[in-house]
Image (tube, rainbow, N blue to C red):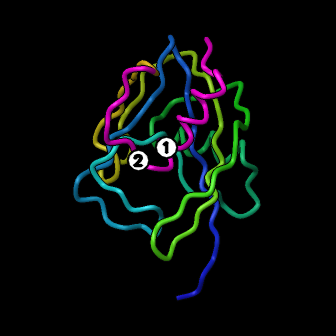
Amino acid sequence: MEKVIKVGVGVIIEYDNKILLGHRVNNYRDSGGIYEPDSWTLPGGKQEFEETIIEAAKREVKEETNLDTHDVRVLTAIDDFQENKHYITITCIAKVNVPDMQVMEPDKIDEWRWFAIDDLPENLYSPSKNSINYYKERNEFHE
């Protein structure tokens, strides 16, 4: 197996002192990313060739939730490892004007839900957990 590093983008969407998480379906197939079905994740995915980080963040949120984001900025980059996989997850922060999201890819995510930053589900997708912990440690949460 060829060893490569891939780039993923996760987006912390702030709205009304909450962040958005999606539930990864139990029977989700391994798409080559960090494989953790039945966990809660930030919106996001793989960055495409010749796409900026901000463009990737906006596209992934739109594809997965149908939300339009604004004030998107980069928060951090974190190494995420799983057997034979190495991702650099670039975490962005974004805002939305209207919190009405939709499940756009039901084969991957079966529910989107807003969570208070101090009342998150236990089974967080590990790259999302790393990003959220960084976010909380730096007191980045604001309206």
Start-end of magenta stretch? 118-143
Q: x and y percent of residue 95 in the render?
A: 61, 22
Residue that appears at 70% across and 36% down: 75
Q: x and y percent of residue 101 in the render?
A: 42, 28
Return the mark for residue 125: 2
83 over 55 or under it: above or below: below
Residue that appears at 64% across and 31% down: 93
Q: x and y percent of residue 133 in the render?
A: 54, 35
Secondary element at tag 1: helix
In this view, the residue farthest toward the bottom is 1
Left or right position of 43 against 3? left
In this view, the residue farthest toward the left is 26
116 over 75 or under it: above or below: above
Q: x and y percent of residue 66 in the render?
A: 48, 34
Q: Quadrant of residue 8?
A: bottom right
The amino acid type of the residue labelled 1 equals Ser
Cβ atoms at labels 1 and 2 below 8 Å apart: yes
- How far apart are labels 1 and 2 at the CA level? 5 Å
Left or right position of 15 against 138? left
Which is nearer the eye, 116 or 31?
A: 116
Secondary element at tag 2: loop
Residue that appears at 76% across and 60% down: 50
In this view, the residue farthest toward the front is 137
Return the mark for residue 141: none
Could you classify mark 2 by the number of other residues whose Cα lies within 10 Å: few (under 14), some (14-19), or many (20 or more)?
A: many
114 over 42 or under it: above or below: above
The stretch drawn in magenta includes residue 65: no
The amino acid type of the residue labelled 2 equals Tyr
* Location of mark 1 (residue): 128
Which is nearer the eye, 27 or 38?
A: 38
Q: Quadrant of the C terminus?
A: top right
The stretch drawn in magenta includes residue 139: yes
